């Protein structure tokens, strides 16, 4: 390629070279030049209604596609609006590239009242991103982009930020340099550690596997390892669906007593892609989680080796590669160790321990899954999602994710569902959101309409922040601030020309009286089928007890 181009045009071409096909953002005067090269490129631009939604859309896109989500944001308020999504991405190890403008270089650090000015934008973002870099010379843009993608994909994933000063965006640069041929990094897996782990596995009589969000691309390898060891597999929230329907599957929270009993009864725990974070392992903050005494840990993040939970053997590496390597050191058919029976007993005990109202909510989730088995279910912080995080199985890996653990941002679900829908094309996406959380991000309906994504917004309307109200009551605190009024969600959907339906699944007005078998799920099934036939976005409001 000959001739010159502007920094803004080169940016688009570099993104294309890294396989980017979608960006999320809202243009502004500080980023208009970055948009110059988008027309005629192979990159599709999605316009949310605010930058927080842009970040959450990029998150949902990344989780569904396995590729980094990319945002184009204006200087100052555009970037600060995206801080919450970046923090969520950091907590859940989601690859996200945030490209923003920044004021002209001559003005930086002076803080004299320029439009969108911050005292030190990059320093602020460094507190939560894997890195935050500024383009200082136009010729450095290719290496800056290359470094950002390497940072997001070669270690533990997370958000990366690049800022481009407004006075450089129109700068002329030479032709796009040849793509650097990335050296395929050596796996770096310590084969000695794998061999030690294999010997420990061979000696175990009651092994157990814990699989988290870092394992979602290792489905086949984890299944193979589990079957060779006859080991139950407990999946955390972000690992659900890895062994869907398998006799060794335990889709239950490690914070529940029955799962903790299973862990204590195991003479070996193999943890794959899980942080042992408190929101998964000590959700009730009761201090009842006991770290495994005999632990093999597989993680691509070497910092976990020096963490608070010591491992007997630590294997640094990609979950799929390291797990597959460990399996290759074990016999195809080992000695039967009652793994399926241990898993079934734990599933039964877990379900029996749940409150009746939680079991009823699980019935709702199962009805959605069984009606649309190929759907990806994206959740906000709402009671349906809390129930599913405790005990429920998705139809496959990467088909159940939400913000109700880890950073726990309200307003995540709808925009993340739109991002997932953009990534998945015609495949259905279900957004599970409460009436309170939905009011954080109603503009996601507009983006869903623009993109014609087949997202079905399922609104669990329990008249406010019911989970917080229950918590306050449990601590003898008079509930205040938990009953915000809700709009007519069906009318808001209609204003966007999105079909909507309101249903009531039972007659009881008291949530604590809710029990399995009480819900008329035929209404929900009919509404889901109708929404799916529509093909584009749709909304179903469920009036909860």
Image (cartoon, grey):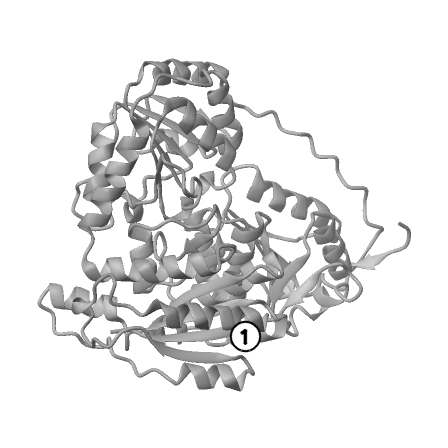
- Residue 106 at what x, y percent from top left? 64, 63
Label 1's element?
Answer: loop
Q: Residue at x 24, y 77 (%)?
A: 507
Q: Residue at x 61, y 61 (%)?
A: 426
- Residue 146 at what x, y percent from top left? 67, 44
Q: Residue at x 43, y 45 (%)?
A: 241
Which one is nearer the viewer's eye here, 220 or 176? Answer: 220
Crowding near the residue tagged with mark 1, few <14, some 14–19, many ≥20 C-alpha atoms within 10 Å: some
Vertically, is 466 above or below 296? Answer: below
Vertically, is 221 above or below 481? Answer: above
Vertically, is 524 above or below 182? Answer: below
Which one is nearer the viewer's eye here, 456 or 14? Answer: 456
Asked whether residue 194 is in view, the answer is yes
Which one is nearer the viewer's eye here, 152 or 254? Answer: 254
Q: Residue furthest left?
A: 476
- The mark tally for this picture is 1
Quarter of image, res 336:
top left
Which one is nearer the viewer's eye here, 168 or 537? Answer: 537
Quarter of image, res 434:
bottom left
- Residue 332 at what x, y percent from top left? 47, 18
Vertically, is 544 above or below 212? Answer: below
Whether residue 263 sits left or right of residue 62 in the image: it is left
Q: Which residue is mark 1?
A: 49
Asked whether residue 114 is in view, the answer is no
Which corner quadrant holds the C terminus?
Answer: bottom left
């Amino acid at each position: 390629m000959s001739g010159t181009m502007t920094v803004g045009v080169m940016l688009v071409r570099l993104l294309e070279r890294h396989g980017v096909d979608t960006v999320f953002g809202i243009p502004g005067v500080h980023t208009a030049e970055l948009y110059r090269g988008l027309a005629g490129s192979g990159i599709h631009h999605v316009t949310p209604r605010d930058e927080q939604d842009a970040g959450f859309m990029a998150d949902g896109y990344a989780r569904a596609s396995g590729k980094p989500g990319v945002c184009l944001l204006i200087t100052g308020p555009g970037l600060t609006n995206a801080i919450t999504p970046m923090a969520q991405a950091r907590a859940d190890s989601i690859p996200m590239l945030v490209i923003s403008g920044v004021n002209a270089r001559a003005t930086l650090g002076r803080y004299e009242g320029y439009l969108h000015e911050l005292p030190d934008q990059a320093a602020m973002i460094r507190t939560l991103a894997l890195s935050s870099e500024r383009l200082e010379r136009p010729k450095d843009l290719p290496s800056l982009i290359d470094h950002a993608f390497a940072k997001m994909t070669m270690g533990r994933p997370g958000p990366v930020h690049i800022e481009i000063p407004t006075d450089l965006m129109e700068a002329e640069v030479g032709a796009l340099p040849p793509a650097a041929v990335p050296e395929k990094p050596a796996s770096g897996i310590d084969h000695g550690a794998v061999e030690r782990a294999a010997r420990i596995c061979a000696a175990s009589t009651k092994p157990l596997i814990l699989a988290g969000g870092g394992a979602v691309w290792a489905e086949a390898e984890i299944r193979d390892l589990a079957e060779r060891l006859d080991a139950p597999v407990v999946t955390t929230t972000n690992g659900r669906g890895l062994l869907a329907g398998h006799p060794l599957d335990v889709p239950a929270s490690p914070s529940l007593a029955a799962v903790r009993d299973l862990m204590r009864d195991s003479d070996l725990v193999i943890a794959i892609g899980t942080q042992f974070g408190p929101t998964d392992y000590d959700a009730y903050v009761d201090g009842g989680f006991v770290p495994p005494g005999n632990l093999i840990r597989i993680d691509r993040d070497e910092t976990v080796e020096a963490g608070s939970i010591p491992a007997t053997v630590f294997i640094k590496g990609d979950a799929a590669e390291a797990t597959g390597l460990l399996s290759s050191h074990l016999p195809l058919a080992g000695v039967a160790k009652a793994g399926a029976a241990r898993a079934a007993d734990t599933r039964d005990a877990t379900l029996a321990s749940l409150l009746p109202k939680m079991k009823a909510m699980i019935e709702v989730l199962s009805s959605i899954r069984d009606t649309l088995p190929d759907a990806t279910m994206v959740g906000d912080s709402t009671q349906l999602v809390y129930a599913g995080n405790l005990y429920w199985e998705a139809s496959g890996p990467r088909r159940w994710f939400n913000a109700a653990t880890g950073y726990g941002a309200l307003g995540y679900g709808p925009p993340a569902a739109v991002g997932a829908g953009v990534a998945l094309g015609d495949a259905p996406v279900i957004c599970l959101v409460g009436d309170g959380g939905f009011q954080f991000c109603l503009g996601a309906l507009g983006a869903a309409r623009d993109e014609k994504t087949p997202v079905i917004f399922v609104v669990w309307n329990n008249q406010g922040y019911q989970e917080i109200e229950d918590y306050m009551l449990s601590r003898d605190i008079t509930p205040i601030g938990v009953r915000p009024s809700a709009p007519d969600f069906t009318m808001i959907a209609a204003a966007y020309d999105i079909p909507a339906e309101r249903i009531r699944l039972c007659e009881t007005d008291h949530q604590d009286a809710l029990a399995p078998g009480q819900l008329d799920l035929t209404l929900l099934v009919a509404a889901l089928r109708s929404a799916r036939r529509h093909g584009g976005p749709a909304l179903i409001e469920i009036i909860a007890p």
